[in-house]
Amino acid sequence: MLGSRRSYAVFGLVTALSLAATACSSSGASGTGSSTPHSGGHLTFALASDPICVDPQQQGNNDAIYPARQLVDSLTDQDPKTGKIVPWLARSWEVSKDATTFTFHLRGGATFSDGTPVDARAVKDNFDGIVRLGAKSVLGASYLAGYRGTTVVDKNTARVTFKAPNAQFLQATSTFTLGLLARSTTRLPATKRCTDHIVGSGPFTLVDYTPNKSVEERRRAGYSWGSSLWRKKGPAYLERISFKVVPESGVRTGSLQSGQADAIGGVAPQDEDGLKAAGFTLLSRANPGVPFALTANTARPLTRDARVRRAIQLGVNRKEVVDTVLSRRYKPATSSLASTTTAYKNLGDRLAYAPDRARKLLEEAGWKPGPGGIRVKDGRKLSLKVVWATNFGPNQTALELIQQQLKKIGVQITLKSTSIGDYVQVRQKGDYDYAWGNTTRVDPDILRTSFSSKGLNLSRLHDSALDAVLDKQSATADAARRAEYAARAQALVLEKGYQVPVFELTTVVGVSGKVHDLDFEASSRLQFHDTWLS
């Protein structure tokens, strides 16, 4: 059975409905004019932050993914318009009725850039290796939860099995995290894979990565096994791509205006109108997954109380954050999943700004008004520590506004910034009350990654009811039933105050008129194979 048909049966209905609204203004192909696509050219793309690690199996932030995605192919791809899973390295596949066994039939002839074949043994090496990475591959560990192993049936047939049903896995095979790397890479220690030694089968190869400066990539000659979604067959148009690290938003904007960069990521909301007025194109697409939110560390004394967590939820004015800090391209969060995620459920009524109700909950929890307007209980201030990463420009301004909003209900917030490279480690140590961030993924199983006590459990949760619902959505192959479980999981996360959703991330990219066909994939990351310069 062709994989695309099977995937549609499992995921198609809910995915298609939820992704129908993902396109934003100016999304899709980029560039102006009507000249004919041609090969050649050197594109410079300005990143908002240092990638830190260009290994796609270890990283999950946009500025690492942009260069890493170009180096690897995946078993499948996902249509960003319909959500349908389609062939890439795998020409077809079968999924067992209980979603525990996935058999992939690989296309012949694909090779890694060191000349070794992309075969069933390579699939096994990669999945076994991602499991060994453990916490260094936060997303990979979730996608392969319950992994029993991969059997090499024959040279081009790999059978992946799980100990329990794992309905999300087929969609996971379309992600960069499960992109395939050569054995010369997978056999290396994780630390040696961050700055070099990345050997993939993708349309570009890594030439050099200089931390805090640039990632240099070159087109791979002879490449002919791209995604079935790509318009161009064979090698990419672009000869070279330079990803330059330019942390200051104003400098990035200036580099686009001066022609030093052909495209820039992380366009600051305050720069959007100016770029449009100057004739530049803005590409934007709402990110699916977990919206930007405060996620509670339930092991801490103050955030262990559900009344405190719920009060924080009610004390945040999401609309004010979007209207003040962001732009019309962004939306206030209305659930524990972004609205472009498969099986999203609108729970906006539970997130309405209600400071009076928040104050009442804190009173019930024993927190009384104290000096400077900050509540106290048993001689202790209601002071909460929030950790956040500096990977998204508006983070600090948004958090400072939330800090002011929560002070109005008597809650003191202290902010502690960290680099995106240290963020997971900081969360693992647990010295915080709330963590600020988001995670992008089309599949609702991202909730299990974030809130299951059976995974990395960075929130220190021990909620058997939530675990049961998260497990059911992962184990159910039927799209409609799976959507019901996902909706219940979203509600439980909010009811118990584990998460304070604030706004949905939108990826905004600025491009010059010479850039054409710069495309978003389903997870709102960029794919450069079809891109060309006039």
Image (tube, rainbow, N blue to C red):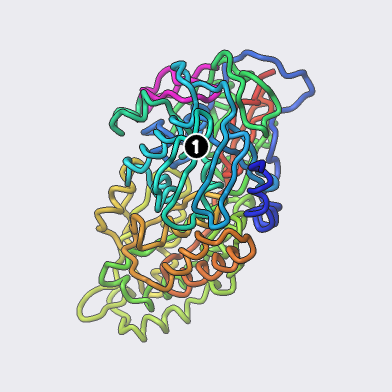
Residue 210 magenta-drawn? yes
Residue nearer the viewer, 458 or 464: 464
**Above or below: residue 186 compared with residue 303:** above
Q: Residue visible at 45% across and 70% down?
A: 313
**Above or below: residue 49 compared with residue 372:** above
Location of residue 418 in the rendering, given as x and y in whole percent from the top left corner: 32, 46
Type of the residue with mark 1: Ala
In this rendering, does residue 98 appear at all?
Answer: yes
Residue 354 magenta-drawn? no
Residue nearer the viewer, 283 or 173: 173
Residue found at the very far right of the displayed protein: 34
**Above or below: residue 176 compared with residue 258:** below
Q: Residues within 10 Å of mark 1 (few under 14, many from 20)?
A: many
Task: Indicate the quadrant where residue 128 lies.
Answer: top left
Position of the N terminus by quadrant = top right
Q: Is residue 519 left or right of residue 401?
A: right
Q: Residue visible at 64% across and 34% down?
A: 519
Location of residue 86 in the rendering, given as x and y in whole percent from the top left corner: 65, 40
Q: Residue visible at 74% across and 27% down?
A: 32
Location of residue 498 in the rendering, given as x and y in whole percent from the top left corner: 41, 68
| Residue extent of the magenta highlight | 196-219
Residue found at the very far left of the displayed protein: 379
Tally of marks: 1
Which residue bears the numbered disc 1?
Answer: 158
